[in-house]
Image (cartoon, grey):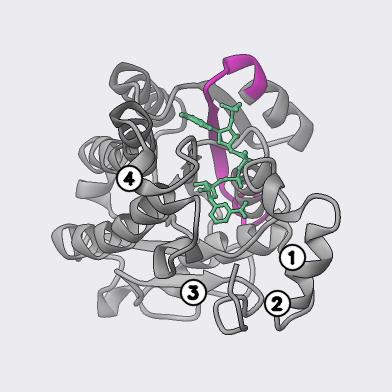
Amino acid sequence: MTPTGSPEAAGNPGPAGSLEGKVALVTGASRGIGLAAAAALRDQGARVVITSRSEERAKEAAAELGGAIEGFGAHATDEAAARACVEHTVATYGRLDVLVNNAGTNPAYGPVIDQDHARFTKTMDVNLWAPILWTSLAVRAWMGEHGGSVVNTASIGGYSVAADVGVYHVSKAALIHLTKQLALELAPAVRVNAIAPGVVRTRLAEALWQGERETKVAAATPLGRIGEPEDIGAAVAFLAGDAARWITGETLVVDGGQLLGPGAV
Ligand SMILES: NC(=O)c1ccc[n+]([C@@H]2O[C@H](COP(=O)([O-])OP(=O)(O)OC[C@H]3O[C@@H](n4cnc5c(N)ncnc54)[C@H](OP(=O)(O)O)[C@@H]3O)[C@@H](O)[C@H]2O)c1
């Protein structure tokens, strides 16, 4: 095994194609950021398996993107489905080099003290437990022995507080910390990093950008617009690939400067 951060791994990773021959798995990728990340990884040369709660939606999304992508139905917190997906990936493609823990949810709107245990638990299960579960499976199935790279999808919400989405923000803050913890535990074989997107044009964040809200968010964003899923996909591909070979435990903010601006969203 060549540890991903070792001196032997040094060398010019090349501007493109750094994932040539590699295999990636992206959870929660039937649309939005996950789908864009899958496309970016594929464009770097990887074969990619994407998941959704619905096998049909996963397969439709994979077909839409064309070659080198396969869809698999697996709820992110369903251990049996997760195990089946990881085993299928390694059995079919012979390896698993990149895991993107992207599936996320935000069912707990309103002040934290008004939330019930069920909504709290669902948020934490999908946003925090699932990345542990899938990372554990990927490490045991392939990465622990052969090396690999994990990218978690956090949020700038993990660095800020805001009314009405407190539980979600707490889950993403914990995911940023989890990223460091796993990076330490899994080095040198496996690098573990995260991205922290700002407001991106996806269904999950519709309430933040629909209608007139988009103009307001764009005005509060130093780079002048909300994010597109492809903006995040490019950052995922960077962290997953050899260009980031000496980066681990890091969270890359990809938000057009939203965290810098007044009244960050
Ligand atoms: N959009 C933003 O502004 C923003 C900002 C910061 C962070 N994020 C994070 O980015 C990630 C992706 O969100 P998105 O904005 O791209 O949302 P999205 O467009 O709603 O996509 C969410 C994806 O996750 C899948 N999914 C949802 N729950 C799942 C589960 N329990 N198991 C498996 N798959 C599941 C959905 O597929 P099915 O419905 O087909 O299952 C869908 O493909 C999330 O972790 C989110 O917290 C988003």
Q: Is residue 43 magenta?
A: yes
Q: In this view of the protein, which residue sits in the foreground, 252 or 218? A: 218
Instruction: Tell me the crowding category of disc 2: few under 14, some 14 to 19, or many 20 or more residues within 10 angstroms, Cα based.
Output: many
Q: In this view of the protein, which residue sits in the foreground, 92 or 265? A: 265
For the residues labelled 2 and 3, say whether their Cβ atoms are less than 8 Å apart.
no
Q: Which-is-in-front pick, marks 2 and 3?
A: 2
Q: Which-is-in-front pick, marks 4 and 2?
A: 4
Residue at label 3? 243
| Residue 149 appears in view | no
Separation of residues labelled 1 and 3 (CA atoms)? 26 Å
Chain-order first, disc 4 or disc 2? 4
Separation of residues labelled 2 and 3 (CA atoms)? 28 Å
Residue at label 1? 226
For the residues labelled 2 and 1, say whether their Cβ atoms are less than 8 Å apart.
yes
Which image quadrant for residue 60?
A: top right
Residue at label 2? 221
Q: Which circle marks residue 122 in the picture?
A: none
